[in-house]
Amino acid sequence: MDRVRRILGYLVFMATAVSVVLGLLTGPGYRAAFWSLRTSVEILYLSSYFAIAAGGLALIWGLLCLSTRSWARAFVSTSVIALSLAFVLGLRDYRSEARNHPPIHDVTTDFDDKPAFVKLSPRDYGEEGLIVPDGGRKDLEPLSPTERLRRWHEEVYADVNSLVMAGDVGQITNIAAQTLRGMRLSLAAVVPEQGRVEAIHTSRWYGFRDDVVVRVRPLEAPCKVVVDVRSVSRIGVSDLGANGARIRRFLREMADIPAVGCDETGNTS
């Protein structure tokens, strides 16, 4: 019995260690270009299989430890089971959450006149062109990828609209740049006279990069400008809602900025 318990304990340790190591390697390995994103995802799922194995072995090991009143080992086995469940359930919830987001990666406040990138280059779709799945919806099946993109965008991001602010173009452009910097984006271009800011968001774990451009244009009303923003992922079909969430946060923070005062001639003060 003791030998079986020792072997099980060793297997639990090995399965747990392999699961942890594989899970920790997925992001940094992809970020360092050791393997593709597809391979990284495959490694992540392989890690989950080892986590399941570790949990199952830990359950048997824990029962044997309880039968011999080895309380410390039983506690360790319980911890392994809990960690295994947390990892597997977390991965399942992530997949479920991913299905709830539209299969698009280009979000903007002005779909008909999207803010243009100058410093940064929009993603190159290559020979395959723009890919926008229909999500199993029959009403989207006959549409072209561009038409599907518009439909998804209208349905999910109807609240993402242009923002009207008080101030001049240069001043609001600088405020937009400060806001993006506060959101931990790296500024690529700030051109106040053109009302343009371009920035890059890089995710911490995988190093995914999204390009963001803000456009500020004057309105006919004195001391009024309209702010538009666009966020585009460099890879992937779906952005899992990241671009939309980023734009919503940017608009909220810009809207909370105190209005700039204007004198009777419409100049900012």
Image (spheres, rainbow, N blue to C red):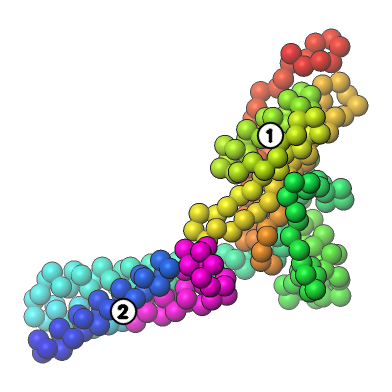
Read off the residue under disc 1: 176
Few, some or many C-alpha atoms within 10 Å of disc 2 (few <14, some 14-19, many ≥20)?
many
Residue 263 drawn at (x, y percent): 80, 11
| Magenta range | 26-53
Residue 160 in percent (x, y) is at 74, 46
- The residue positioned 47% from the left and 73% from the top of the image is 44
Q: Amino acid at mark 1?
A: Ala
Q: Position of residue 29 (x, y in %)?
A: 48, 67
For marks 1 and 2, the one nearer the N-term is: 2
Note whether 180 is above or below 230 in the view shown: above
Left or right, 231 with reference to 80? right
Q: Nearer the viewer, residue 42 or 220?
A: 42
Quadrant housing the C terminus: top right
Query: Does the magenta-highlighted stretch encompass residue 51?
Result: yes
Q: Quadrant of residue 76?
A: bottom left
- Residue at disc 1, secondary structure: helix
Task: Classify mark 2: helix, strand or loop.
Answer: helix
Contact between labelled residues 2 and 1, with CB atoms less than 8 Å apart: no
Q: Which residue is mark 2?
A: 15
